[in-house]
Image: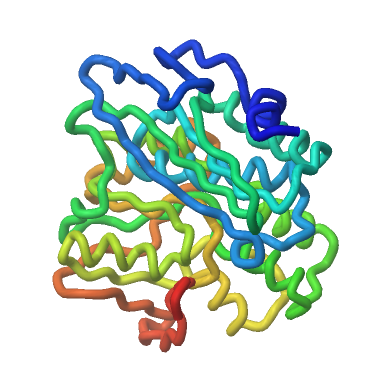
Amino acid sequence: MSEFDLIRRHFTRATPSALLGVGDDAALLQVSAGNVLAVSSDMLVCGTHFFTDADPYLLGHKTLAVNLSDMAAMGANPRWATLALSLPKVDEAWLEQFSAGFFSLAQQHGVELIGGDTTRGPLNLCVTIMGEVPQGKTLRRDGAQVGDEVWVSGSLGDAALGLAHLQGKIDLPEDARIHCLAALHQPTPRVALGLALRGVATSAIDISDGLLSDLGHILERSQVGGEIDFVTLPIPDVMISNELKQRCVLSGGDDYELCFTAPAARHVDILSISEKLNLPLTRIGKIVAGQGWVIQDATGNQLKIESTGYEHFQ
């Protein structure tokens, strides 16, 4: 099978919202009036981000999901994506399942695949995603203000626990194993939440490398500090050591939940958003003057943290 046959068979779909989609040297897009274009790229590398025997359907889902999560963090409505694949060989059964997982999630969010590339090499998957957001309504990392509340969506640490189970570090009971592996392999991008937070949140970021690492980006860009109450964090109800649970929740990564800040005066509005979306939103702390974050335990003492999140080059 040639490269072009592979693209036609597995990755060519109708793109009615694009002026020109797959099949030419470049796609042509028209951004809606009054909107700006949000663009993000993420790469998943075999052996670094997923195991060699990863389920291709779930991998197709996750490949797009991690990019949709970036759109959610910007308050952007996802519209278009490109996909670049490096494949060790042409495996049609694998490609059929991978593309099925990718397009199933794409259809849920109205995303059109408008181009990309394929080449022979170690298995790598790279998506560039594009979305629209009204001028002046973008959620950014640099808007947190002293006095803002810090919130997170969903629960934290589930994906990290699932990975720890696969690595043989813990043995999760069946119910927890099913839940945590689903969080790891098939994350839910919080696109609807990102849209709902326009005009409410002062800053936002998706939690991909760990809560403390990603919250740290907000604090650094906004030039503020943060106080986090550990006892308020939405943590997994699993019988494991407190040390491992703390590490998974604070620095485990792969959560793909949103961490955001908002004025205390919008507290009720955020609870209303939570109810409307049927999505738990938890206030975990506040923004203070200074730099960096402080994590407090139930007695108000500062927790000692050894790892803040995943680093590719450390």
> By what rule are the colours in the image chosen?
rainbow
Q: Is residue 124 left or right of residue 127?
A: right
Q: Position of residue 33 (x, y in %)?
A: 23, 15
Q: Residue drawn at (47%, 50%), measured in percent from left and top?
A: 42
**Image quadrant where one finds the C terminus:** bottom left
The tally of labels here is: 0
Q: Residue drawn at (60%, 66%), measured in percent from left and top?
A: 48
**Image quadrant where one finds the N terminus:** top right
From this view, report whether residue 187 is shown above or below residue 132: below
From this view, report whether residue 147 is shown above or below residue 199: below
Q: Residue drawn at (40%, 39%), measured in percent from left and top?
A: 71
Quadrant assignment, res 27: top left
Q: Position of residue 248 (x, y in %)?
A: 57, 72
Q: Position of residue 199 (x, y in %)?
A: 24, 35
The foreground one among 53 and 137 is 53
The foreground one among 95 and 192 is 95
From this view, report whether residue 127 is shown above or below residue 53: above
The foreground one among 16 and 192 is 16
Quadrant assignment, res 85: top right
Q: Residue drawn at (67%, 49%), measured in percent from left and top?
A: 87
Residue 197 in sight in this render:
yes
